[in-house]
């Protein structure tokens, strides 16, 4: 790397998967970023407060507080921080919430360094025509289940009660996302 550490854009990488963090950190540093790593929201907040990053990659689900808490904190610290939320549990409900809280982009895992860097540069074209398309029923059901699950803080039993569904039925549905999400 030819740039000094002070000249590199800063990135805060927050994910509880240590191996994933090591691999992604190395790949992002090769692309000219100075990367700091935290493995929980609780570990990341003081790091961000002492030095707000220009970029952040935040896992949605980790032990402790969820990644959306950090998205909100990062956005409050510096509204210009470009935040990409990564998740293995993609849903429209959490994507919308992440964007409302200040995320720049929302990516489903696995995502590689090139996809993440491209997501930072992503700017929605507000003039693009919106195409009308029908959403398959299984996708609508999956999105609704994910929204209700999120509202019940990922508690499967409470979600099953709210959906008036047997817990085992809900678990089967959660284990098999629609084909486009797999």
Image (cartoon, grey):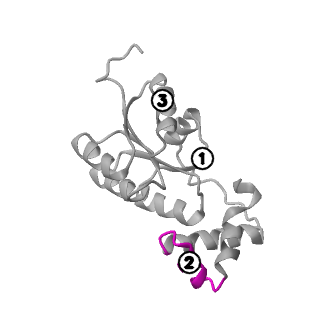
Cα–Cα span, label 3 and label 1: 16 Å
Q: Which label lies toward us, 1 or 2?
A: 2
Asked whether 117 or 68 is in front, the reply is 68
Q: Quadrant of residue 165?
A: bottom right
Q: Are marks 1 and 2 in contact (CB under 8 Å)?
A: no
Q: Is residue 157 magenta?
A: yes
Q: Look at mark 1 in the image and give the residue it sits on.
A: 109
Q: Seen from this angle, which residue lies furthest bottom? A: 164
Asked whether 171 or 29 is in front, the reply is 171
The numbered disc on residue 87 is none
Q: Look at mark 3 in the image and give the residue it sits on.
A: 28
Within 10 Å of disc 2 (Cα), the crowding (few <14, some 14-19, many 20+) is some
Q: Identify the element where label 1 is drawn.
A: loop
Residue appearing at x 53%, y 79% in the figure:
158
Highlighted magenta segment, given as a residue range: 152-165
Q: Is residue 179 magenta?
A: no
């Amino acid at each position: 790397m030819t740039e000094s550490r002070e000249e590199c854009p800063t990135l805060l990488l927050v994910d509880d998967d240590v191996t994933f963090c090591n691999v992604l950190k190395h790949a992002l540093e090769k692309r000219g970023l100075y990367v700091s790593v935290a493995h929980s929201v609780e570990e990341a907040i003081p790091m961000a407060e002492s030095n707000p990053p220009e970029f952040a990659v935040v896992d949605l689900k980790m032990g402790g507080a969820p990644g959306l808490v950090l998205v909100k904190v990062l956005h409050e610290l510096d509204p210009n921080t470009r935040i990409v939320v990564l998740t293995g549990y993609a849903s429209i409900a959490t994507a919308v919430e992440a964007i409302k809280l200040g995320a720049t982009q929302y990516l489903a895992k696995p995502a590689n360094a090139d996809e993440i860097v491209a997501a930072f540069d992503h700017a929605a074209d507000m003039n693009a025509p919106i195409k009308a398309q029908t959403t398959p029923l299984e996708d609508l059901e999956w999105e609704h289940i994910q929204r209700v699950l999120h509202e019940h803080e990922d508690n499967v039993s409470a979600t099953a009660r709210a959906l008036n569904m047997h817990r085992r039925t809900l678990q089967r549905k959660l284990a098999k996302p629609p084909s486009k999400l797999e």
